[in-house]
Image (cartoon, helix red, strand yellow):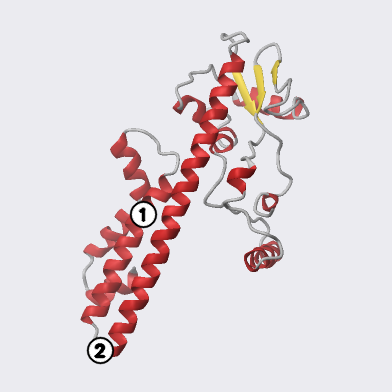
Amino acid sequence: MILQTKSTKKPILIFFYFGLALTVFFLSIYRGAESAYRTEQGIPFYIGAITLLLSSKIINSNGKKALKIIASLSLVIILTVQICSSNYWYHVNVLRDKEEKQVVCNIAKDLEKYDKNKPVIFIGYYQLSNNIEDKYTVKKDSVAGRIIDYTSKKAKKSYTYTACQTSISSYISWSICPFSSAKFFNSCGYDFKLGTNEQFKEATKKYINIPSYNDSGYILDAGDYIVVKVGNYSPNFYDFLYE
């Protein structure tokens, strides 16, 4: 970004790149609601912008015609791969979204048997079904698996704390863990009375061993609030990355 702005002497490009970074948020503002897979929807804008810039560089370069042709063909191949990849991950995210919305409907139906005046505390980590996992996990003995294993070990040696997130992750868990609430449930049209952060911390420690969705007893009336355990916690993020 900085090199491109310096070489062209056009400061306006700074705003162009900054706008690209805000694409995912602009989509939400335009719709008036959050998108469950906004990252994948924003990627095509990045691809289009980068392709435009590279095309401009190739056309305006002083290189030989043969080099321009090779560069153009390479750009077309890269663009095709990016489009296919973007479409694939968008499709998988749509499948993931449908699955989790069905889970939300099932939990909401089961909650109808309990006191609606009590706050609902959601705990646990929902693990996506094998149908979804098979589309984004890799085998440990594959090339991709070896690369992930190698880089994760190097990262653990180099940094005190490491975190990683794939393009596909549970939206239910995302709404529970950082916000201590049922944000995804609310976005699906279910207006549960939410508990406090103190109740969430208490429930996480006290009721972590109750059954998980979809086993009998995954919903518990704890007296002051209702506890719903959506799934078990994973001891290691990379457990989700491998088959």
Q: Quadrant of residue 126?
A: top right
Residue 21's disc number: 1
C-alpha span from label 2 to label 1: 34 Å
Give me the residue at 29% from left, 89% from top.
Answer: 66
Q: Nearer the viewer, residue 64 or 158?
A: 64
Report whether 217 appears left or right of 14: right
Q: Quadrant of residue 229?
A: top right
Where does the image place residue 203, in percent across and percent down from the top left?
70, 25
Q: Quarter of the image for the N terminus: give it.
A: bottom left
Q: Can residue 135 be spotted in the picture?
A: yes
Where does the image place residue 169, in percent across and percent down from the top left?
56, 45
Where does the image place residue 8, in percent across and percent down from the top left?
23, 75
**SS at mark 1?**
helix
Q: Amino acid at mark 1?
A: Ala
Report whether 226 appears left or right of 10: right
Q: Nearer the viewer, residue 201 or 228?
A: 228
Please name the residue that numbered disc 2 is placed on: 65
Residue lying at the far right of the rendered structure? 209
Q: Amino acid at mark 2?
A: Lys
Q: Nearer the viewer, residue 144 or 209?
A: 144
Q: Can residue 181 be spotted in the picture?
A: no
Give me the residue at 65% from left, 53% from top.
Answer: 241
